[in-house]
Amino acid sequence: MTMASTGAATGGGLQLGTNARGELVARVGDVWLEDPEDPVAAARAFMTPAQAEGVELVVLVGGGTGHRVARLRELGVRHVVAHEPVDALREQIRGPLAPLFRGCRVTGTERELAAAVRQTLARREGTRLLTSSAYARLFPALMAACAEPGRQALAAAEDAFETGRHRAALGAEQLAANVARLPGKVKVGALAEAKPLAGKPAFVVAAGPSLDRNLHLVTAAGRRGAIFAVTTAARAEEHAGGAVDVHVAHAPQPLGAPH
């Protein structure tokens, strides 16, 4: 096996060379970045056709000498972001190894990697974040940095779930409080019979800052057609003496509770 040192690298000195079959291999210190005996076979095992089905974007932590990138291309992955934390190897990727990474976006900073990881989270489907055991061994802090955007996304999802649960509970509470007010009210389905609306306009009243200035228009509008108002615009009905035909309550929240 022919190896040559290419200078200092993050995690130890980088050695780049070829194995007995002439295949490009690299190691940092005593850690091989690919299988030195058969890197092509190792790249095939890295992702199988079944695992690649439907995958369009891969963020690969550890570009190495390009064998894994070639495998992703072979499997039809359209977009590959190769993050190479070994400085000396990244210089090679942007230099003599560039043909092996053609069409692949190469990153080197943690900020770039975090942005790429967030991209996979935003797309939700058809994406993968992949690395090899060699890079996980060499760069444990980088693996933790990769996990941080996912942790943040999970925390945001949990917050959204708690908000949804709170709103559902609030909606149930408001419904229970309003049950007594429902008897005798005209149902939406019977509105056309109670107030013929064919060919007449519909007015939607929301609780914007201009509502207070235009409350006097609600009564006149009610004589011309139907008025639909959100719950926080209930004061329009009070001002118009019952002219609002339908109240729409959506996404219960504390702001609408008094109405």
Image (tube, rainbow, N blue to C red):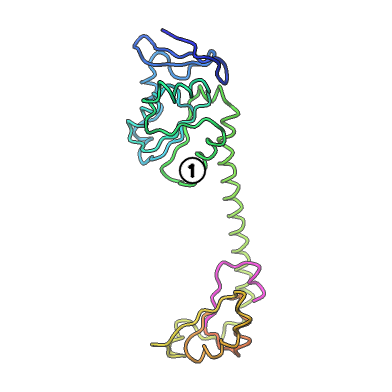
Q: Quadrant of the C terminus?
A: bottom right
Q: Which residue is mark 1?
A: 119
Looking at the picture, how far across and down is residue 146, in whole percent? Answer: 55, 35
Looking at the picture, how far across and down is residue 5, in whole percent? Answer: 49, 11
**Residue at x 52%, y 89% (from the top left corner):** 222
**Residue at x 57%, y 19% (from the top left corner):** 11
Specify whether 78 is left or right of 15. left
**Residue at x 56%, y 76% (from the top left corner):** 206
Q: Quadrant of the N terminus?
A: top left
Element class at badge 1: helix
Q: Does 1 appear above or below 81? A: above
* Quarter of the figure with residue 149: top right
Looking at the picture, how far across and down is residue 20, in whole percent? Answer: 36, 9
The count of marks equals 1
| Residue type of the residue flagged with mark 1 | Gln
- Is 48 in front, or is 177? 48
- Is 57 in front, or is 192? 57
Range of the magenta residues? 246-259
* Quarter of the figure with residue 21: top left
Categorize mark 1 by other alpha carbons within 10 Å: few (<14), some (14-19), many (20+).
Answer: some
Looking at the picture, how far across and down is residue 130, in whole percent? Answer: 47, 32
Is residue 72 rendered magenta in the image?
Answer: no
**Residue at x 39%, y 23% (from the top left corner):** 67
